[in-house]
Image (cartoon, grey):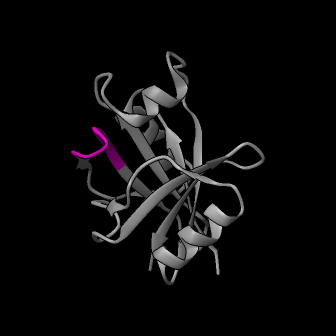
Amino acid sequence: MFSFHHVGYVVTDLSLSVNGFENLGYVASKTYFDKVQNIKIVVMQNNNDPMIELILPIEDNNPINRFFGKNKSPTPYHVCYSVADISNASEHLRSQGFIATMKASLSVAFDNKPFIFFYSQPTGLIELIET
């Protein structure tokens, strides 16, 4: 039901982080602006390695700053899983005690596919994206 998709990584300087991951062999996508979450996103890919989604919070009005507060060091933020049906997968997570942190929205960085975030104490923040 759930397949690993990417790791979301919060950064403080998008250009510096892109350069750092390029030095590890990753190739950067264009920069996307997500108006709903008030963030900039660059997707990094390296052959068959897992994708890394670099996320730069813009100003204070975004879910990352609400989640992390004033912690401004680059850090992994979430793990994303692809699912065939986001509604069914969401209901499954809710039945397991996960709490949705937002309403489903469309991902600007992943071909406008539906996505949603969930939180639970044992797993932390996870994202679902419908593929």
Pick the front one: 70 or 30: 70
Going by the image, does 11 lie left or right of 119? left
Q: Quadrant of residue 7?
A: bottom right
**Place of residue 81 in the rendered image (x, y in percent of width and height, measured from the top left):** 58, 67
Residue at 41 percent of width and 63 percent of height? 115
Q: Look at the image and tell me in which quarter the C terminus lies.
A: bottom left
Pick the front one: 2 or 55: 2
Residue 40 is one of the magenta-drawn residues = yes
List the single residue furthest toward the right.
122
Going by the image, does 33 lie left or right of 48? left
**Place of residue 30 in the rendered image (x, y in percent of width and height, measured from the top left):** 26, 55
Q: Give the total of numbered labels.
A: 0
Residue at 63 percent of width and 64 percent of height? 93
Pick the front one: 107 or 100: 100
**Place of residue 107 in the rendered image (x, y in percent of width and height, measured from the top left):** 32, 61
Going by the image, does 128 lie left or right of 57? right
Pick the front one: 26 or 114: 114
Q: Look at the image and tell me in which quarter the N terminus lies.
A: bottom right
The magenta stretch is 35-41
Residue 103 is one of the magenta-drawn residues = no
List the single residue furthest toward the top.
70
Residue at 21 percent of width and 45 percent of height? 35
Q: Tell me if residue 43 comes above or below residue 2 in the rendering.
A: above
Residue at 44 percent of width and 26 percent of height? 65
